[in-house]
Amino acid sequence: MATKPERDTVLLLTHSGDYYTVDRVAEALARRGAKTFRFDTDRFPREVRLAARLSGAGNYTIEDGAATCDARAVRAVWARKIWPPVLDEHLDPKFRQMCLRESVAALHGFFDGLHAARWVNDRAREDEAGNKLRQLRLAAEAGLAIPRTLLTNDAEQAREFFRENDGALVAKLLTAVSVSMGADSDFVYTNKVGAGDLEDAAGLRHSPMVFQEHIPKSLELRVAYVAGKFFVGALDASRTVGGQIDWRRAAPGECRWQRDEIPAELAAQLTTLMRRLQLVYGAIDIIRTPAGRHVFLEVNPGGEWGMLERDLDFPISEAIADALLV
């Protein structure tokens, strides 16, 4: 009878283009005596092989070259980035959608075999937390200030909201498309809305958008929350050429992160929100106005924190390792 493996492994779920943060967490885990196994989900099914044998408790394994991970040895899972499977480019197009659908289903089914492990974050909770309108509702209930917000596919509603906010409006998507510390070419930024943008907004009927009042900024805060700890970075993009509306559009070197802190009342409100969302980790975006008011924008359950550790020497990777090994 085969011996059940010791639960001493942390599975790192990410993608093949990921760097820095995944390595920092792996190093922090190694210092704590934990083994790690990196699974780049975009390399499945072409390069990585999965197998799930169900008989009684079942046996789930991942094979990547000569390396094998037995799910029974997995103590925790860091769901850093779960990327869709990438299929062979030579696959017959008539089979592509079926193969992609089956690969996604297989991947999600395989994750169920890791139900006994600690997840950061739990996938179901993270999916729920990704609902931006739910975030804003819960944030307001927790006492946080939020921007006046409209989600619509109705052009007239958008024009009316523009007038209500005296033309001070920004537009954004409900879903995020960035995948790493550097935004890719398909990244869609938050943009200021002009009157001309809404004159003929018939395209809204094909894709709803989120419109929010434009909040004046003194500083933009990125708050990395890890199991009750806050790591706060602040950025002043007001004098940049492209980053005044969205700091991610600033040119490299135009503005720099600096250490910051948040008031105790704000920390308590954010803690309440994160507990309601049941997230162990989240990247929280907040605006500090010139009057010192803090306005909550959103929390990204898989948002970036690498720049805060790299530039400000915050021990975020250490905190994530601790949260995984609780």
Image (cartoon, rainbow, N blue to C red):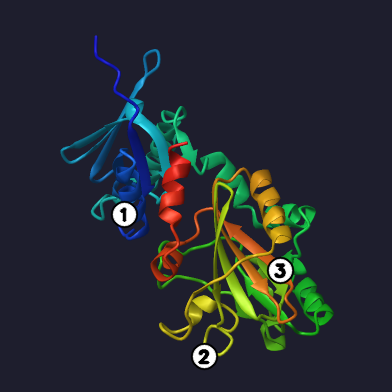
**Three-letter residue code for mark 3:** Val
State if disc 1 and disc 2 touch (CB < 8 Å): no
State if disc 3 and disc 1 touch (CB < 8 Å): no
User: Mark 2 or 1 closer to N-term?
Assistant: 1
Left or right of 37 in this view: 208: right
| Secondary structure found at label 2 | loop
Left or right of 25 in this view: 298: right
Q: Which residue is drawn at the image coordinates 26% and 51% (left, top)?
A: 88
Q: Of the residues tagged 2 and 1, which is closer to the observer?
A: 1
| Secondary structure found at label 3 | strand
Q: Which residue is mark 1?
A: 23
| Secondary structure found at label 1 | helix
Q: Which residue is drawn at the image coordinates 73% and 52% (left, top)?
A: 138
x and y percentages locating residue 255 in the rendered image? 48, 83
Q: Which residue is mark 2?
A: 241
Q: Of the residues tagged 2 and 3, which is closer to the observer?
A: 3
x and y percentages locating residue 75 in the rendered image? 39, 32
